[in-house]
Image (spheres, grey):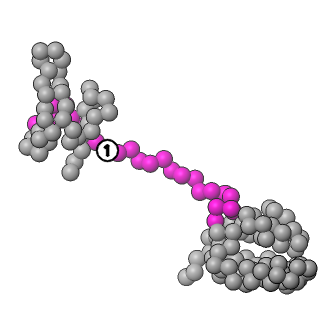
Amino acid sequence: MTQYTHPDLADFLSPAPFKLGAGDAQISYARGFWDKASEQEIAALGFIEYVAPAPEPVEPSTDPADYPLLPWQFKALVMYLGKDGDIRAAINAITDDLGRATAMSRYENASAYVYGDPLMQQLRAAVGLSEQELSDAWMVAKDLASS
């Protein structure tokens, strides 16, 4: 259904009831007016078709923490950086057996990889990547398409 607005009725949007005129000349129109009135009658009363404003464009985030990576994207990132061996060595250097097993399992089997994950940041530092290097590579990996 077409919606209408009126320049003299602040915040008005059809199909609400409305009043036009002032004092003794004021006329009330019921909600049913919209079901029965022709386009010409609506226009004659000064109504114009309501066109919703276009939404403000949203700039995409430049923060890698806003983009979890799928396993294949993360593996592509690691291969691109040539850091698989360094990551595995850093994980194998963890002295706590359960911590090492957990870290390796998360590295190999996560359903998503999150930039802000403490393990991710520990491994980044352990393999000699700066935050900027990882951030830049992450932002490239997030845009990889599967086909």
Question: For residue 144, what is the image quadrant?
Answer: bottom right
Which residue is farthest top? 23
Give the left or right position of residue 98, taking residue 19 as reference.
Answer: right
- 90 vs 27, left or right, is right
Q: Position of residue 66 (x, y in %)?
A: 64, 61
Answer yes or no: is residue 29 visible.
yes
**Which residue is drawn at the image coordinates 18% and 35% (left, top)?**
17
Most foreground residue, 127 or 100: 100
Residue that mark 1 sits on? 51
- At label 1, counting other C-alpha atoms closer than 10 Å, the crowd grade (few under 14, some 14-19, many 20 or more) is few
Q: Does residue 40 appear in this view?
A: no
Percent coordinates x, y for residue 65 in the rendering: 68, 62
Q: Tell me the amino acid under the disc marked 1.
A: Val
Residue drawn where x is 88% and y is 72% of the image? 126
Q: How many marks?
A: 1
Label 1 SS: loop
Q: Main secondary structure of the magenta part?
A: loop
Residue visible at 64% across and 65% down in the picture: 67
* Residue name at image x 77 percent, y 70 percent: 120
Whole-percent x and y of residue 95? 91, 79
Q: Is residue 79 above or below residue 123?
A: below
Magenta range: 41-67
Left or right: where 23 falls relative to 66 = left
Q: Is residue 61 magenta?
A: yes
Residue 36, quarter of the rendered image: top left
Residue 32 quadrant:
top left
Instruction: Identify whether 60 is placed above or below 136.
Output: above
Find residue 93 and report its horizontal and vertical position in percent.
91, 80
